[in-house]
Image: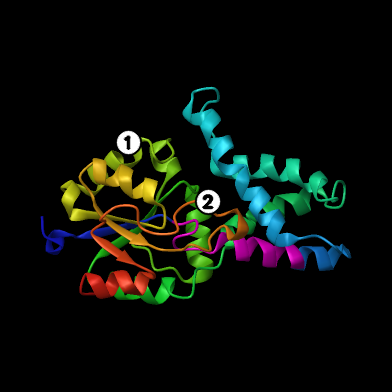
Amino acid sequence: MSLGNVKVLLFDTFGTVADWRGSIARMGERAAREKGVEGVDWDAFARAWRAGYRPGMARVISGERPWTSVDVIHRERLEEILPEFGMDGVFSEAEKTDMNLFWHRLDPWPDSVPGLLRLKQKFLIGPLSNGSLILLSAMAKRAGIPWDFVFSSDTFKAFKRDPAVYLGAIALLGLEPGEVMMTAAHNDDLEAARSHGMRTAYINRPYEYGPDQTKDFQADEDWDVITDTITGVADAIGA
């Protein structure tokens, strides 16, 4: 099937569109300065916070826990790691609530907004993300990310790589699977999308996790588009 049939591009967000590691580290450093806290490795803090993401989702995916928003998972993980980084009791409950909103204020990669603006001229674009609806919407509003719509895990009460997420998005769009392209920096996300007939675009972000990166250093399969930037996706599909 030709890529000329593609009408909608869906995007993974954490790591693909947004630089979560750099963003969390920068915001943590600012919060620490305001509290007079020194000596915290905020890059390591960001990576430790993110490390609770998949285990938190796994409890929901397995059925051990009922549907739980990623915002709750992030907050629970924050409570775990603050003591590990020597900050037990440093932040008030209100300050921790605000820290949890760091995930709503992530900065996009430099190529993200320019690339998305180009794609938006020709295609419908939106996230297909494990982020919550309010997280994705708030991030887009703050950063000027020009989504046409937002598909979040809240939409489907499921996390990727559950088939309900991909199939639900296709159904809501009312399109054939091959008319929808999944764009991600994670091979397993694209593998799941392709298994349901979607087109695929891989954006290489081998620095997403910094020293914790263990995979996604390159495209593992012959995805329809393979590039290093969202502007590269626009180049590849004629936007």
Badge 1 amino acid = Pro
SS of the residue under disc 1: helix
Q: Tell me where residue 149 sits by quadrant.
A: bottom left
Q: Position of residue 6 (x, y in %)?
A: 18, 60
> In the rendered image, which quarter contains the N terminus?
bottom left
Q: Is residue 121 visible?
A: no
Looking at the picture, tell me which residue is in the foreground, 115 or 42.
42
How far apart marks 2 and 1 lie (CA) works out to 25 Å
Looking at the picture, tell me which residue is in the foreground, 228 or 59.
228
- Nearer the viewer's eye, disc 2 or disc 1? 2
Q: How is the image coloured?
A: rainbow
Q: Is residue 239 visible?
A: yes
SS of the residue under disc 2: loop
Badge 2 amino acid = Thr
Looking at the picture, tell me which residue is in the foreground, 144 or 113.
113
In this picture, residue 141 sits left or right of residue 167 = right
**Which residue is rendered at x = 59% and y = 56% of the image?**
103
**Residue 17 inside the magenta-drawn segment:** yes
Q: Residue furthest left?
A: 1
**Residue 187 inside the magenta-drawn segment:** no
Q: Work out whether 196 lies above or below 142.
A: above
Residue that numbered label 1 is attached to: 163
Residue that numbered label 2 is attached to: 214
Q: Work out whether 101 lies above or below 123.
A: above
Q: Position of residue 145 (x, y in %)?
A: 44, 68
Q: Position of residue 31 (x, y in %)?
A: 77, 63
Q: Residue furthest top?
A: 64
Q: Residues within 10 Å of mark 2 (few under 14, many from 20)?
A: few
**Which residue is rendered at x = 46% and y = 63% of the image?**
205
Residues in magenta, as a range = 13-29
**Which residue is rendered at x = 53% and y = 36% of the image?**
57
